[in-house]
Amino acid sequence: MSSTSNANAFRQSRGDRQGNMMPGSNRQSPMRNRSYGGNGQSGSRKLQQPQQVKKIATGLGWFSIGLGVAELIAPDRVARLVGVKPTSTTRTMLRMAGARELAAGIGILSNEQPTGWVWSRVAGDALDISMIGAAMNKDGTDRSRLNTAAVAVIGVTALDILAGKGLSSQSSQANGSRAGGIHVKRSITIMRPREDVYSFWHDFQNLPQFMKHLESVTSLGDGRTHWKAKAPAGTSVEWDAEVTADQPNELIAWHSLGNSDVNNSGMVRFTQAPGARGTEVHVDLRYNPPGGALGALFAKMFGEEPGGQIADDLRRFKQVMELGEIMKSDASIVEGPHPAQPLSSRELRSAQDMQGGQNIQSMRSGA
Amino acid sequence: MRATCWMGKKKVEVRNVPDPQILNQRDAIVRITSTAICGSDLHLYNGFVPSMESGDVLGHEFMGEVMEVGRGVKNLKVGDRVVVPFPIACGLCGACRAEAYSLCENSNPNAYMAEKLWGHSPAGIFGYSHMLGGFAGGQAEFARVPFADVGPIKIENGFSDEQVLFLSDIFPTGYMGAEMCGIKQGDVIAVWGAGPVGQFAIASAYLLGAERVIAIDRYDYRLNLARENTGAETINYEQVDSVVDTLNEMTGGRGPDHCIDAVGLEAHAHGMQFAYDRAKQAMMLESDRPITLREAAMSCKNGGTISVIGVYGGFVDKFPMGAIMNRSLTIKTGQCHVQRYMRPLLQHIEKGDIDPSFVISHTMRLEDAAKGYEMFVNKSDNCEKVVLKA
């Protein structure tokens, strides 16, 4: 398929979706052309460029780790440096601050979206400033050193706020929704003809086979479907959806209807991979998770990124298409940590119940 | 069943774990007759590979008898004797169709973990961390073998386990290391590391037509093995001032035509360089010690190849990219695509070109696996290769 017809297909689908999309998401114009990086983010930005913000955040992350290590290992020297008399109380407080700094540093450096962790630094700064204020009135403090420390902390606070604001504005831009919704794009290449991949996806009832959080999709007729998905803490969410665009072997788009638990819309495009490598599947999802912006931010801080979830779902989709089943390992079929050792029959039964009880026949020796 | 479990850094125990069962249609269950400890298992043992969990069953070099097959396996039957390749590969994805089996796109259920560290994920591997799949390994009485219709090779003649077991990893790995050099008549090949993989790289370099092979190690017993078995020349790097100078001296100032790194991330050296890297590693400022890579990059002949089959995990420091770029060096590397090499290498064994059992220094019971790890890591009693009998 040429990129021109591809673009046309896309424009058409966007047209179809106009007026039906969830609030706030019509600001987006994703993938107008096939150049990536920076498009849509340039223009009138008040804050720094994304790269700069990321750099500042990374710098702050390392600063946190350096300071945290110093406070943990040598609290007395840190105390003397800022002009406080080293006592067992200052030692404990500095060590606690050190642990906090380390956590923030690791959080910032290990997360692609460190927004929450940067804001946690701002909270820490406030704590530090109040501690310095309290120390001013204590005996045995070196005022001039303490003043220098206060100026330094205030400076760092300013930097933290700057980075936090920059990151927050970026993530709300990327999410395409002022309400803090989530926008995820992921792709995978599948060694199967476009027709096969399209028609498997086209039957939405197949989706729970590889989409881990999806329990069921049932047809309501009329291009409308009812979706049920697992939500945190053993709850579930349900919604109705309708297809908004359907171009055989090229594109399917849908969105949720009315007052859904989770307002969402999705689009999947199928293109031929170059060099006889099968089909490229490009998925584009938007949704407002339960708990709104706060829920999404919380999930991100602790690493459960929706993008990662979709990437895993797509990998399972590839397995279903290429292998006819989902690849399992000893550790991967259990929820939560499990050593890479065979499961007991009881563990295996409960794991299979959770996955819809796929029954594998086999030929035992002597059977 | 009894299985060798990783219980933390430098702690291995043979424990009771549940018997494996068929989980996917193309699985087989194999009753293991022989298995081996690999040099790369020592990276797990020493705690250099992330995403290990206490209780993980170790082992990726094993062979045995088919006990049970899933309904998708048509080419094997109960009772067949098989050697199992260490990378798990589906045979159907783009990578497998290109015979890049260790890059199988479908065999790592924990691909997301590998993607975090490496960008994309390679294939799953038996008993080699959760980021490479979380598969129980083969240093055990039984193992579940996924994609049994693609991986395992049937052994139908009267070879002993010891003669064919190393088709599972170290013979093909050494062979691929030599093959990646694109050896031509008259070439001089330098091989860092005369452990088991290094021995097979040396032997394979000769098989592929190298004129001379120079082995570099610090253990005389390993260098002796290389000299006696293949006629390689040797350098004990603890007995020379500079490996690079010595290689230049031995090659008329050209440097070796191609270099093979059969050492990987825990390389040793004498002097400041080792202290520097070990300190950085301890402070977690680099994860891997690239000592071999540096020496290879500085000594390789202009236009030559650095073939990396030693295992690396993360990041290296002070990597001489300038030497590599300006002197037109090529780096080739990869976990071995074992499935590609098993058949042709079995033919070499059948023809009598090589008897892979020459690397074995110790044969023990599976129950003694912990002792085997300890001996191998400490190089005690001239330990070269440990085979465990289940």
Image (tube, grey):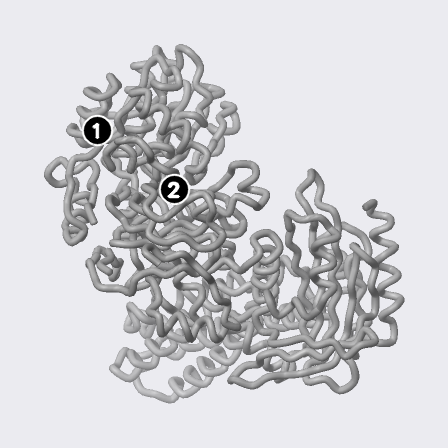
Label 1 neighbour load within 10 Å: few <14, some 14-19, many 20+: some
B339 relative to B197 in the view: left or right: right
Nearer to us in this view, B52 or A275: A275
Asked whether residue B277 is in view, the answer is no
Nearer to us in this view, B203 or A148: B203
Please state the horizontal and vertical placement of residue A38, each as a whole percent of the image.
Answer: 72, 56
Give the chain of mark 1: B
Question: Which residue corresponds to mark 1?
Answer: B358
Most foreground residue, B297 or A5: A5
State the residue position of label 2: B85
How packed mark 2 is, by other alpha carbons closer than 10 Å (few <14, some 14-19, many 20 or more), is many
Identify the residue at horizontal 51%, vertical 77% (top origin). Answer: A120
Indicate the position of residue A244 as horizontal and vertical percent values.
83, 70
Q: Residue B74, which numbered label?
A: none
Exactly how many numbered labels are in the figure? 2
**Residue type, label 2:** Pro
Residue drawn at the location 47% of the way across and 52% of the way down: B26
Confirm whether residue B69 shows in the render.
yes
Earlier-in-chain disc, 2 versus 1 = 2
B203 vs A269, left or right, is left
Rendering coords of residue B191 (x, y %): 32, 26
Q: Please give the name of the residue rendered at 57% of the width and 81% of the height, measured from the top-left corner.
A: A231
Q: Are marks 2 and 1 on the same chain?
A: yes
Query: Is A345 left, or right, of B17 in this rendering?
Result: right
**Which chain is disc 2 placed on?**
B
Q: State the image coordinates of residue A273 (x, y, percent, origin top left).
A: 71, 45
Circle 2 sits in a helix, a strand or a loop, which is it? loop
Q: CA distance from mark 2 to mark 1?
A: 20 Å
